[in-house]
Amino acid sequence: MEKHKPVVVVGAGPAGLCAAIELKKAGAPVILLDENDKPGGQLFKQIHKFFGSREHKAGTRGFTIGTSLLDESLKLGIDVRLETEVVGVDPGLRVWAVRQRASSELIEASRLILATGATENALSFPGWTLPGVMTAGCAQTLINVYRVLPGKRVLIIGSGNVGVIVGYQLMQSGAEVVGIVEALPSLGGYGVHTAKLARAGVPFYTGTTVVRAEGVESLERATIAQVDGSFKPIASTERTLDVDTICLAVGLTPSLELSSLAGCRTIYVPELGGRMPLHDEYMRSSVQEVYVVGDTAGVEEASTAMEEGRLAGVHAAWSLGYMSDDDMKERVDETKQRLNALRQGVFGQKRFNAKARIIQESQLR
């Protein structure tokens, strides 16, 4: 077989790890790059148990899944390069990487799989720059990775899965969650997550927003208020809560920096986080040698990210001749079935429809 340039996978989170594992198992040369000093991405912040089916690791905690993927990647001998930041992608898939901020290298790739995740959205209001105001992901990192409690009385803005999961984990860590604030008239997270906080007596304020945060040297109190039909605060409904921490859980936006450098076209899909790279059913972008997986290709759960990584890894291996047509079709069909199973229910069906629109749009272009 002709010797190929390596497939470069950027991002060693759940999607990137699964893509690299599938490539290596097929015999394809692969290099996995990540800017952090440890692989695993968000999985090692997730101490809660996954749910769904056995195939989707139901009943297994996120960090346990991360450990399993890491063990498999080590056994396969994948070339993992940590503390390596990709800073550029030239035409012809020339990938520029900087390692430990000290040395740079140019890697010529045969395929590029981008698993660069998403960034947390911010929310500006008077006092939002005070110490004590942070994103929910920041709080989750502090408690689950560094074992540091960010505050004792916490107000969470946003009732999606991230907000309620982090809220429960903050309670497990010893903090008091004084409330969950949601601007929409209904809660956004799965019932299995919101129920835990409800049983613990945490109040949910729907149709409500944060008006301002106040404090001398750090956060001391927050004022919330109900909103009208245009989401404007109603002054007569203001109430002030004594808090030392506000966690912002107001959504995620796919990271587009590297896909933009690679020349990938984008599409706007609000159900999946906003603007993201256009991709087909195999996770190929508009640049056929570039794949996008995980939250980069639309914000969903870690289980979905892993399946998308497997899908891209299998297809990339096949495209380079490391897998037969029959094997590729069988593996792709199996993975699509698992993805479809994950995209069921009220929330999942919206994502299923959104993904279908993306794939249809990629065919039209």
Image (cartoon, rainbow, N blue to C red):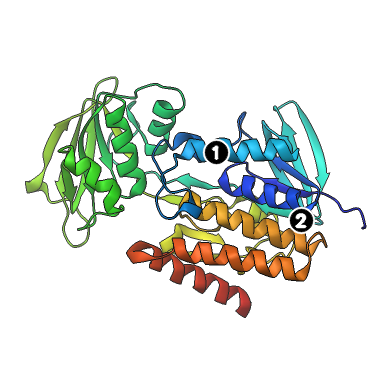
Reading the image, the residue beneath label 1 is: 66
**Furthest residue to the front?**
54
Residue 207: x percent and y percent?
18, 54
* Image quadrant assignment for residue 228: bottom left
Residue 269: x percent and y percent?
46, 65
Reading the image, the residue beneath label 2 is: 111
The structure residue drawn at horizontal position 44% and vertical position 38%, both measured from the top left corner, is 46
Q: How many marks?
A: 2
The structure residue drawn at horizontal position 45% and vertical position 42%, both measured from the top left corner, is 60
Residue type, label 1: Gly
Instruction: Give neighbour class at mark 2: few <14, some 14-19, many 20+ (Cα, 10 Å).
Output: many
Instruction: Give neighbour class at mark 1: few <14, some 14-19, many 20+ (Cα, 10 Å).
Output: many
Q: Secondary structure at mark 1?
A: helix
Residue 295: x percent and y percent?
52, 52
Q: Quick one: 346 or 22, which is closer to the camera?
A: 22
Q: Earlier in the sequence, mark 1 or mark 2?
A: 1
Q: CA distance from mark 1 to mark 2?
A: 25 Å
Q: Quick one: 300 or 208, which is closer to the camera?
A: 300
Q: Secondary structure at mark 2?
A: strand
Residue type, label 2: Arg
Residue 263, placed above or below residue 28: below
Question: Does any portion of residue 235 appear in the rendered image?
Answer: yes
**Furthest residue to the left?**
236
**Furthest residue to the right?**
2
Are circles 1 and 2 on residues that touch, CB within 8 Å?
no
Residue 238: x percent and y percent?
11, 43
The structure residue drawn at horizontal position 50% and vertical position 34%, both measured from the top left corner, is 44
The structure residue drawn at horizontal position 31% and vertical position 53%, both measured from the top left corner, is 190
Left or right of 227 in this view: 96 = right
Query: Image quadrant for the N terminus?
Result: bottom right
Residue 197, placed above or below residue 207: above
Foreground label between 1 and 2: 1
